[in-house]
Image (cartoon, rainbow, N blue to C red):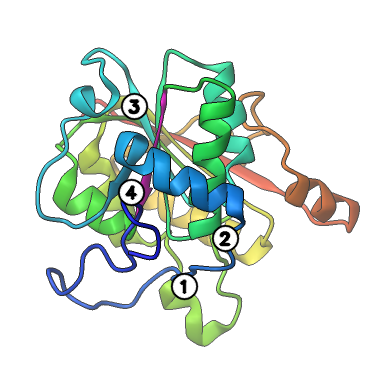
Amino acid sequence: PMFPGGPLADPAGSHHERRIRSFRPRRGRVTPGQGEALRRLWGQWGLDIDGLSRIDLGELFGDPDLPVVLEIGFGMGEATAQMAAADPDTGILAADVHTPGQGNLLALAERNNLSNIRVANGDAIILLREMLEPASLAGLRVYFPDPWPKKRHHKRRLIQPEFIALAATRLRPGALLHCATDWEPYAEQMLEVLTADPHFENTQPDGGYSPRPDFRPLTKFEGQGLEKGHVVHDLIFRRRDT
């Protein structure tokens, strides 16, 4: 690993098939503070997604009764830290491949005494499929995933029927699946895919987009987009009981 005791560069290695990826692996430039956080805190709050064993979320968070939400793609982690601070009775398993962001989120968690955050490094699909138990999650958040705007790259978008079907197996009844994007064509695809899956129901009676809920912070990146005239769409669907 780049940081002794820290996240691995390719935790799943050759254990699982090389399919089309919905993300670009990014190591990026890590600041001294982020690197220090990775070295010191990864063993306590970090998890490499190697796909080799199931995770006991109660054991991971030190509380068997703590509801746990999976967040896929957290950037630099500021919004994740804000959500964790606002809701200490919910655990957040935050998955990403961006090393500086992993270090930054760990540093934020320590600085703000956020014991309800765990950081997962690697492919979230492998995490869902191989490492999480059925009906183990109280929610799933996918905020501003890569829109892959070119038509030939649309197959790389995360929100596809196969992914939603997989997510349905890991979400408990009543769990919320919450997506947000500022890319209009991707928002339309998300709405179509989620509406078509029989395991989910739209929380909006009109079957459309949701207002941004108070629990999703307005990030600096999102604010800059709004200033440029971008329209952000939230989609909140609930896992049906059957």
Q: Residues within 10 Å of mark 2 (few under 14, many from 20)?
A: some
Left or right, residue 90 beside residue 207: left
Q: Looking at the rendering, which quadrant does residue 92 occupy?
A: top left
Which residue does the numbered mark 4 point to in the structure image? 197
2 or 1: tag closer to the N-terminus: 1
**Residue 202 placement (x, y as % from top left):** 47, 35
**Residue 106 placement (x, y as % from top left):** 49, 39
**Residue 206 placement (x, y as % from top left):** 59, 35
Left or right, residue 173 beside residue 87: left
Please give the label number shown on residue 68.
Answer: 3
1 or 4: tag closer to the N-terminus: 1
Which residue does the numbered mark 2 point to in the structure image? 30
Amino acid carrying mark 4 in the image: Asp
- The reply to whether residue 199 is visible in this rendering is yes
Residue occupying image coordinates x 49% and y 69% = 26
Secondary structure of residue under mark 2: loop
2 or 4: tag closer to the N-terminus: 2
Tell me the CA gap for discs 3 and 2. Answer: 28 Å
Which residue does the numbered mark 1 point to in the structure image? 24
Query: What secondary structure predominates along the stretch shown in magenta?
Result: strand
Amino acid carrying mark 1 in the image: Arg
